[in-house]
Image: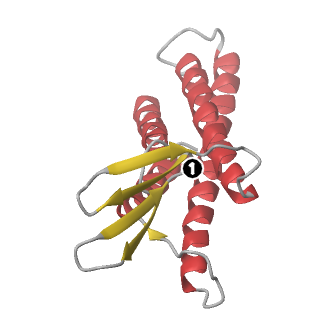
């Protein structure tokens, strides 16, 4: 049972880790003439544009002070989630009954409990970050008073949110 829970939690941590570097979190298309169009897409780390020929140009976000607070919050929550999940995996691996590393049963139980709490907080952090980011995109798109360029949830973000929810829930299910 412990090994199964450990595998589920590590799988969830890997799913959460796989969501961070994906490029298309938000996506927008601007069509000017029949033959030319521009696609704008971004994630937490860079903004990209591609034209109708498929050529993409990406640039990193140049200034930390130029970002909105919500992007900082999502970045921080995802990084915290990945770090806590990593330490949770180590603690649970050390504290499992089948590893015989932690010492007495009471010490193993405490270490496993600490690892489980790391997994729980890790899953909550990732769920909050991805849910907030997806809701922000949706709210800006549906707001008739929002005057800036409207972005949609990108092709990958729909899958990212599914993966994130699966990853977050599998991290939390260990408890």
Quadrant in which the N terminus appears:
top left
Numbered label tally: 1
Q: Is residue 95 left or right of residue 169?
A: right
Tell me where residue 153 sits by quadrant: bottom left
x, y percentage for residue 105?
64, 17
Q: How many other residues sit within 10 Å of disc 1, few (<14), some (14-19) or many (≥20)?
A: many
Residue at position x 56%, y 58% from top? 130
Q: Position of residue 5 (x, y in %)?
A: 45, 37
Which residue is labeled 1 in the image?
A: 44
**174 or 156: nearer the viewer:** 156
Place of residue 118 in the rendered image (x, y in percent of width and height, measured from the top left): 66, 36
Q: Position of residue 3 (x, y in %)?
A: 42, 29
Q: Is residue 36 left or right of residue 138?
A: left
Q: Inspect this view and state whether residue 90 appears.
A: yes
Image height of 123 relative to 93, above or below: below
**Residue 132 sits in quarter:** bottom right
Q: Name the quarter where the C terminus is drawn.
A: top right
Residue at (23% x, 58% y) in the render: 53
């Amino acid at each position: 049972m412990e090994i199964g829970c450990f595998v589920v939690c590590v799988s969830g941590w890997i799913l959460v880790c796989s969501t961070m570097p994906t490029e298309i979190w938000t996506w927008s298309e601007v069509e000017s003439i029949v033959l030319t169009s521009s696609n704008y897409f971004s994630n937490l780390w860079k903004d990209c544009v591609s034209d109708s020929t498929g050529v993409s140009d990406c640039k990193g976000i140049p200034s930390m002070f130029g970002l909105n607070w919500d992007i900082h919050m999502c970045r921080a929550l995802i990084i915290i989630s990945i770090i806590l999940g990593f330490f949770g995996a180590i603690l649970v691996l050390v504290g499992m009954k089948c590893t015989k590393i932690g010492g007495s049963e009471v010490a193993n139980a405490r270490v496993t409990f600490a690892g489980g709490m790391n997994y729980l907080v890790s899953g909550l952090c990732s769920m909050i970050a991805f849910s907030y980011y997806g809701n922000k995109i949706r709210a800006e798109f549906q707001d008739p008073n929002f005057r800036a360029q409207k972005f949609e949830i990108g092709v990958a973000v729909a899958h990212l949110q599914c993966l994130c929810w699966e990853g977050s829930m599998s991290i939390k299910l260990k408890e």
